[in-house]
Amino acid sequence: MSQKIAFLCHPYHRGGVTRWMADAAIEYSRLGLEVHFITVKPVKEFLSAKGRESMVQLLTQSENSVQIHLAEVGYEFEFGTPEYRVSVYAQLIERLPAGTPIILSDDASVWKAGAYFHNTYPIVAVLHADEPYYYNIAAQYYKQLSAIICVSKRVNATLLRQIPELEQAQVHTIPCGIKLPAIDNGDRTDGIIKLVYAGRVSVYQKRAGDLLKIAQLLANRNIRFHLDIIGDGDAKAGLMAGAEAAGLQQSISFRGWRSQAEVASFLANADMLLMTSDFEGTPIAMMEALGAGCGMVGTRVSGIEDYEHHAFAESCLSIFAVGDIEDAAEKIVKLSSVLASVRRNAARQLAENEFSMSVCLARYINVIKAIDFKPKATPAYNLPMGQLLKSRLMALARKTKLTLKGK
């Protein structure tokens, strides 16, 4: 087993991908591995951050022995060229001991920087969703990757179909892991179905409008329910207006962006997570819900469909076709009839078997152990002065434009 491992990540928490990287790094360090984490630290919150935690904040919320390699950056990193960001990451990668396996986040500049050093470090890329972005970037860099991790069976199959040159032994299926919380075994008796949506509130991918359609159908059938919508996005304002127009203000609450601890609290007190997505990888929200003992009703998409026939699924997981509002409502009602304690225990057991961090990290270690790698020196990554100047001018122009707009 490699005694060293590294993670290379963009600066801010963007959801499941980055949360997993921070948790995995901390857990590996607790298992006794020498863990390195490469990222950048904004000297001032980026405009694109929108209140999200930085990776440095996630890594330093608890005591651990993760070695953080960072560069302090400003607007020139946020608004500059991709080539400039690659150069910053490259300088940090060069600090690692040769031969250290590097796990990449889903950022294009991160992939490019990691791929540049493929002769010195085994590069492990993760495809987090059944989305063209991941297949396209894998097609661009697969020759520089020592291993590719797909988070679902569908992603694995699609990748091999789209890149027939890939060797099957290079591609693996491992869903991301989560830290499993303690769960409350008490039963609620108010008769209200408590639903939670947690994620980006957008039409693209998440089909946020379907949440309102499902809620309207439940209300029309006189089903007592309450839906907490956690997250922000471009569809939120329209969804809020739609809920008000439909007279559902008492049945739907918009909670905005919440911390991981707050999301966990909502899930622990809910009956079901509701997901309406067009596509996914293997949703972290699903894992966290099941881990909290919360049931799940979601679309038959990548990552969710893998567990439809799991031994514990009958009591805690129901799946409907994308856009099938009638079936979604029926599945919610049917799953609500399962005794809460039975649903909770089944959800937890499914999560323990498939999504615990210990299971996930053991699978990653098995993949890394099988990599046959002899490190070679890589020339330093040097950004030409002309490209550096171009990046700085672009960053200044973009920052000035946004400042004049009052953002």
Image (cartoon, helix red, strand yellow):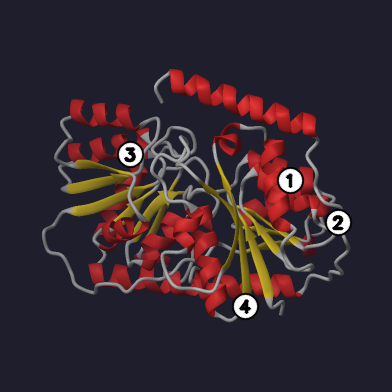
Q: Secondary structure at mark 4?
A: loop
Q: Residue at horizontal 78%, vertical 47%?
A: 141
Label 4 to label 2, Cα distance in Å? 25 Å
| Residue type for callout 3 | Leu
Residue receiving disc 3? 211
Q: Image height check: is 390 above or below 199? A: above
Quarter of the picture containing the C terminus is top left
The reply to whether discs 3 and 2 touch (Cβ–Cβ < 8 Å) is no
Q: Residues within 10 Å of mark 2 (few under 14, many from 20)?
A: some
Question: What amino acid type should be assigned to the residue bearing mark 4?
Answer: Leu
Q: Nearer the viewer, mark 4 or mark 2?
A: 2
First in sequence: mark 4 or mark 3? 4
Q: Which residue is mark 1?
A: 112
Q: Tell whether label 3 touches label 4 (CB within 8 Å).
A: no
Instruction: Decide if residue 304 is in sight here.
Output: no
Q: Quadrant of the N terminus?
A: bottom right
Instruction: Report, in whole angstroms, how far the alpha carbon at label 4 lies from the one at label 1.
Output: 26 Å
Left or right: 190 in relation to 112: left
363 or 309: which is nearer to us?
363
Mark 1, secondary structure of its residue = helix
Looking at the rendered structure, the secondary structure element under dot 2 is: loop
Label 2 sits on residue = 378
